[in-house]
Image: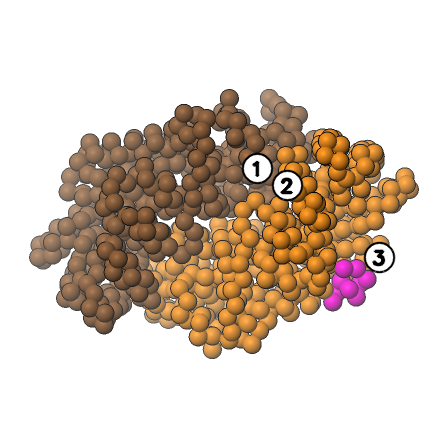
Chain colours: A brown, B orange
Amino acid sequence: MPANWMTTLDTPFLLIEKSKYLRNIERLYSRIHALGSVVRPHLKTLRSIEAASYLLAQGDSPSTVSTLAEAEAFAAAGYTNLLYAVGIAPHKLARVAALMAKGVNLHILLDSEPQADAIAAFGKEHGLKFSVFIEVDCDGHRGGLPPHSDELLTLARLIEASGSTLTGLLAHAGESYSCRTDEAILAAARAECAAIKTAGDRLRAHGYACPILSVGATPTAHFADDLSGITEVRAGVFTTFDLVMKNVGVCRLEDIAISIVTTVIGHNKEKGWVFIDAGWMALSRDRGTAGQSQDYGYGLVCSLSGDHYENLLVTTTNQEHGIIALPPNAAFTVENFPVGSRVRILPNHACATAAMHLQYQVLSDDGQGHEVWQRIVGW
Amino acid sequence: MPANWMTTLDTPFLLIEKSKYLRNIERLYSRIHALGSVVRPHLKTLRSIEAASYLLAQGDSPSTVSTLAEAEAFAAAGYTNLLYAVGIAPHKLARVAALMAKGVNLHILLDSEPQADAIAAFGKEHGLKFSVFIEVDCDGHRGGLPPHSDELLTLARLIEASGSTLTGLLAHAGESYSCRTDEAILAAARAECAAIKTAGDRLRAHGYACPILSVGATPTAHFADDLSGITEVRAGVFTTFDLVMKNVGVCRLEDIAISIVTTVIGHNKEKGWVFIDAGWMALSRDRGTAGQSQDYGYGLVCSLSGDHYENLLVTTTNQEHGIIALPPNAAFTVENFPVGSRVRILPNHACATAAMHLQYQVLSDDGQGHEVWQRIVGW
């Protein structure tokens, strides 16, 4: 039976099942601890102080953010060990400096000489020394320097010559989201570790301490089998999972802790369409499962209690309308979804769906209680 | 030259060029007035009191909203003639009633007997009479009743028997967004008008006054050639336009009043990639041009002054990263986009991109000044 409040709160709303959320965290944390490393969770998925409290045991527990708005909000909440894991834009250094002045250990990321020059110039002008990570490319996915590149050593020299500290290296196996087998994810995890260790070994051979080697993506974090020498592992979407991660093979449908609760607002009986009040404003435009083994449209339909219907998808969305097109030979008709009844939609991509909401309605781990978590917004 | 504030405000941010915004409004309003009808603008694109002030001359000017959150915010700002153009969910009637109690003329929409029964029951219990529109299906796009259906008359009877008023009919040529020629849009516009007039004639022949016939979609509103008998025309995205509308043929690139200002944060020289700090969080996941004549990826790149680069697109997005992949044989290299420089991105779909932002930075119509418009959020 769904909690009473889930039947009365206005729709659409984003639901977090706390019992699953906590279970997902315990699963990854115990796995990474058993391999001798620690998790530096990426807080970008839910961007929520309340959500982060279950990820960060202490104020100085390591964490990762994707915007300075997050850094400022988590710092205000007492978290002081924050890695801003997007390449630094020079004009953002003033906000970084303001957080450092408050005692926050805010690590910044770069992979180019103009960025290293910018922090040197800013640091000189303001008498500041930054804590810097260099991004290492492990799979050609996005940014970062190849581990064997000369530029890696050049950047290390520029950073430390300017008085800042080369705190660590960061690698992100972004291509692992496209893996189709467990073996491929394991290979991606090994390659991610190998790349960063190669880069770290080179820097250390040249006399740079570079104490932190930071790897991670949710798929590789769940498949890595050897983290020796790896200081920390980053992952974000693992707390809630989603249909993309289910397709990648990192979780089961029943592990997905995030869904959208929506109300049926109409039918087209002839076409077998059910209209719901969750369009792309509530679900997001993310179609991350489109190129995967199973395409879930704009999401998989579940009962309000959370049991999923086989092959029942949100097939189309407009801004505030979703259309659930019943599949041919379905075991049910539109009458199974009367006007005013409620269903839940498992999303393709938790980060994108959460981004459409200012707050999350949380089903307490007793399965009845109601909490509300706020989202940090903006940049 | 871009305004000075556009070079210093932190990125990414959403920019509205007010001169284009006002020109787009004038274009549609004068066109619809010349055809003898009026515009009931759909406020869902920007969801902003400040933006609406240029669309609504008076407090009782007709307008359209997509959520009750919008209705409540626009009502609080003094706007009293609001059509909530999403099929009513029975549980939402209490919020509708609360607005009616404040003197707001809030019209609701339905297309089914369970909805008509729900308003009858709620109205009886609370001594309330609603102002109701019935949705008419003109193109099989989404909801609504066929104009010749018996159910149309049944619903009219149920509405008026319960003491509520059948204020009007609503049709929306949603399929017109998929048109590929001007002739096809004109045909869609004529079909939209024909469907609603057929339905209106039938109701009036049965004694229902049904005073309002409301049609509209941005493409059909710009191509309709005969609005005789059509009380009002709804359109939303026409104020800003976007790349989808450019592809449909309703506007030119230089009419698009909305863009995202972003900073270059890195390069992959070998691959010809430029990294920017606008990912899908700033641009949205909308890929509305993917199936159109010209696929713009995640958006078309322009200089900060607004001049677009031929074929230069945001080709990939992550949450806070965008990648501009230079096309083969491009007339420029990544060095043309140094770290720290700024570009603007024209979005695929204005409604979806605006939804990612809490406020809009507005370039005054003098081309220099700076205004900030707030977005209404939530449901």
The residue pinned by badge 3 equals B228
Q: Chain of mark 3?
A: B
Q: Name the residue beneath numbered marker 1.
A: A10
- Residue B116 is situated, as x and y percent measured from the top left of the image, at 74, 34
Judge whether A176 appears above or below A94 on screen: above
Q: Are marks 2 and 3 in contact (CB under 8 Å)?
A: no
| Left or right of residue B359, residue B338 in this image | left
Q: What amino acid type should be assigned to the residue bearing mark 1?
A: Asp
Q: Amino acid at mark 3?
A: Ser
Q: Nearer the viewer, residue B53 or B257?
A: B53
Amino acid on which disc 2 is placed: Arg
State the image coordinates of residue A142 (x, y, percent, origin top left): 33, 53
Labels 2, 1: front one = 2
Crowding near pointer 1: few (<14 within 10 Å), some, many (20+)? Answer: some
Callout 2: 10 Å neighbours few (<14), some, many (20+)?
A: some
Q: Position of residue A9 (x, y in %)?
A: 55, 35
Range covered by the magenta-colored residues: B30-38
Task: Tell me if label 2 and label 1 are in contact, CB under 8 Å.
Answer: yes
Q: Residue at x 60, y 52 (%)?
A: B73
- Residue B34 forms part of the magenta stretch: yes
- Looking at the rendered image, the disc whose residue lies closer to the viewer, 2 or 3, is 2
Q: What residue is drawn where x is 38% and y is 46%?
A: A47
Would you say residue A85 is visible in this rendering? no
| Residue A59 counted in the magenta span | no
Q: CA distance from mark 2 to mark 3?
A: 35 Å
Disc 2 and disc 1: Cα gap in Å? Answer: 10 Å
Quarter-wise, where is residue A11 in the image?
top right
SS of the residue under disc 1: loop
- Give the residue displayed 41% in from the left and 49% down from the top: A376
Q: Position of residue A284 (x, y in %)?
A: 50, 45
